[in-house]
Amino acid sequence: MKVILSPSKLNGTVCAPPSKSCMHRTLICAAAADRPTKIFCSSYSKDTLATIGCLKALGAKFEEFDGGIIVYPIEKGQREECILDCNESGSTLRFMLPFAAALGKKCTLVGAKRLGERPLLPLCTAMEKHGVTPKYEGSFLPCKIEGKLSGGVYEIAGDISSQFITGLLLALGVTGGGEIRTTTPLKSAPYIDITADIQREFGINVIKTESGYIVSEGQKYTSPEEIHIEGDLSNAAFWLVAGAIGSVDAVTCTGLREDTLQGDGKIVEILRSMGAKVEREGDRVTVYRSKLKATVIDCSDIPDIVPILCVAATQAEGTTVFRNIERLRAKESDRVESTAKLISGLGGTITFDENTIYVTASKLSGGEISSFNDHRIAMSGAIASLVCEGSVTIDTAEAVEKSYGDFYEKFIMLGGKCDELSNR
């Protein structure tokens, strides 16, 4: 599907969608708990629906209510071999693989598009030493697992994907405890902090050590009965950048927890460092149209908001430098290449080397770009249209459904001009 976005300006207030990171983890903990859990959330992304589908296959039951979903725990006992369809969700795959193995379920994990090409070997290798050998050929998917994962000490790299460690932590809550030792420096630590925080809500205490994490023996998942999902700062970042570069006056995003553990909460301080006027009141963040300046940004813990920050950088006087970009290459697209093609395809100035992206202030002309089937590239292109001289056409624009199904509707609600939505 293609969408055409004409030059426009946004203004007004939008509520952030539920945090995809928090939702994945909460759903899994609830499915492992001792009794039902009522989860309050306003919507579901394609990725979180993939996790729900996998949990259903494992024996959990779900019931929707006005304002969220009730999760009934996975039934005890061995079920027939099941298929876990992770669709395009890296989180679903890397969480469900060790979690299902800890339950002793005989499963085949499948997925779509680039998912089978994304890194998985370190997790598989760690699991092989604890009773389960994932079996695959060529691509990591389909991947079959048999046996039951045990506790004990796991050694795994910390600089490839924090999702490996989250998956093992979720599994260790089922096995009855264990330890994770990282063999390389940890990247994206805030995501593991989110995991530990949600596990504590469900009665699992995770202890941080100098070399990793410990889940003490004898713990079990216990339901808090009710839990609310906070707003997603990775997706709120698009509206906050829109406020700074493409608003009539300002854009306000609500539902953003002030004491959030989400690493992408750094978007607020980054925009301030670029000279944006940002006001915060409770769960509301307002960003005013501002004159921006270049800065240096460490991308180690914020790979998901680099594309939209590159869009902001095209409007910042000077050359903005993005360091530690290696982990952008193993996302839904190679986000170094796809971000560079997004910016240059719209007339901007961007270069990169192995570890750094450089974006120099430039006028954007508009044009036709591809999302590369990457939701964050599609949404970044939409926000970029606000500062383009001509229209922007985005191919495979439906990629936004992965994390933010009604993104274009919200864009229009705030005053954006977007056509061809009837073909979705």
Image: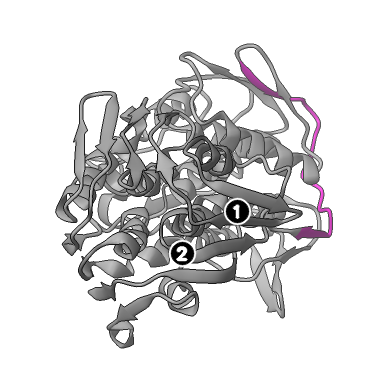
**Quadrant location of the C terminus?**
bottom left
The residue singled out by tag 2 in the image is 247
Gap between marks 1 and 2 measured at Cα = 55 Å
Name the chief secondary structure element in magenta. loop
* Residue at the (40%, 52%) spot, across then down: 108
Which amino acid type is marked by label 1? Gln
Q: Residues within 10 Å of mark 2 (few under 14, many from 20)?
A: many
Amino acid type at circle 2 is Ser
Write the residue at 47% across / 38% down.
274
The answer to whether one can see residue 21 in this image is no
Residue 225 magenta-highlighted: yes
The x and y percentages for residue 318 are 31, 34
- The residue at the far bottom in this view is 422
Whether 222 is drawn above or below 160: the answer is below
Q: Which residues lie in the magenta part? A: 212-227
Q: Position of residue 161 (x, y in %)?
A: 44, 32
Q: Is 323 positioned to the left or the right of 188 in the image? A: left
How far from the left and from the top, in percent, is residue 213?
A: 65, 22
Q: Nearer the viewer, residue 126 or 283?
A: 283
Chain-order first, disc 1 or disc 2: 1
Q: Nearer the viewer, residue 385 or 305?
A: 385
Of the pair 70 and 61, the residue shown nearer to us:
70
Residue at 47% across, 24% down? 126
The circle on residue 78 is: 1
- In the picture provided, is 39 more to the left or to the right than 405? right
The residue mark sitting in front, 1 or 2, is 2
